[in-house]
Amino acid sequence: MPVDQKPKITPEFIRAAKSRGERVAALTAYDYPTARLLDEAGVPLILVGDSVGMVVLGYPDTTQVTLAEMRHHVAAVARAKTKALVVGDLPYHTYQTAPNAVANAHILTEAGAEAIKLEGGVAVVPEIRALREAGIAVMGHIGMLPQHLKEEGGYKIKGRSEEQKVQVMADALAVEEAGAFAVVLELVEPELAREITAKLSIPTIGIGSGAHCFGNILVTHDLIGAFPWFRPKFAVATVDVASAIRGAAEGYVRQVKEGGG
Ligand code: KIV
């Protein structure tokens, strides 16, 4: 079906994906053309992730991304007027209290985000509840939390020890109970991800968490090979955009040097 004839995807539609038995394939976008292309390809959920900091803005991790930067990229994606649900990431240190979370989430929803993602489980339940009370749809994010990279000690699988297993399961249940419509499971030990997926009624959307989550999300730059200097082990690039750009630029340089237009 052409994209303009498709119904708009809502958080409720994603929440009900499990009951429809329809797995969720989510990707990130930070700009207008990428959002349009993903929408035309039938991607139902586009995340304007704070991964923008690493793959677009050149920061070493996501902790330096500001709310102003997120607003700028959310607005660019929103201009694509996608059928896909547009989820905006609340960046680091913008949701330390419930009122803070609501005020900052409103900045992203006013820019065009149709739902908000924030990292954390039990620890952010008051913020998720406050967002829901303010009428803002929330996607959770548990497991390895990139905004807490220092405390996490690197990008490491979560849920190998008994203590972590209990914590990640408690986080999953807390996020669902607080009202999230879906939850990202990042680098969660695959058997634990399977157990969480079986227990929750909302879809689990895995990244580096094995094959048993209900959906999957990737940073689009990893999928298309557009950030060749670092790609996580679990992400397989299916095209090589970096080589295409380099090749086109090399050809152009040659052509101009030789006196072509
Ligand atoms: O910022 C992001 O892109 C994310 C995904 C990797 C889940 O949080």
Image: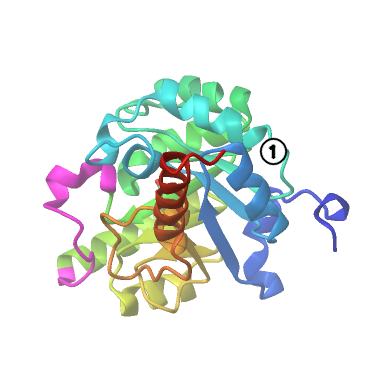
Task: Tell me if residue 258 is in the magenta stretch.
Answer: no
The front one of 94 and 231 is 231
Q: Please state the extent of the stretch shown in magenta in the rendering.
A: 146-162
Q: Tell me, what colour scheme is on the image?
A: rainbow
Residue at 68% over, 53% down: 39
Residue 175, image x and y in percent? 44, 51
Q: Amino acid at mark 1?
A: Ala
| Image position of 10 (left or right of 253) | right
Residue 96 spot, x, y in % from top left: 31, 27
Q: Residue reaching furthest front? A: 259
Specify whether residue 168 is in view: yes
Image point (42%, 25%), residue name? 69
The spot of residue 244 in percent (x, y) is 46, 58
155 is within the stretch colored magenta: yes
Q: Nearer the viewer, residue 170 or 22?
A: 22
Q: Quadrant of residue 61?
A: top left
Which one is nearer the viewer's eye here, 24 or 82? 82
In what quadrant of the picture does the C terminus appear? top right
Of residues 105 and 237, the one nearer the viewer is 237
Give the residue at x 20% y 57%.
155
Quarter of the rendering containing residue 63: top left
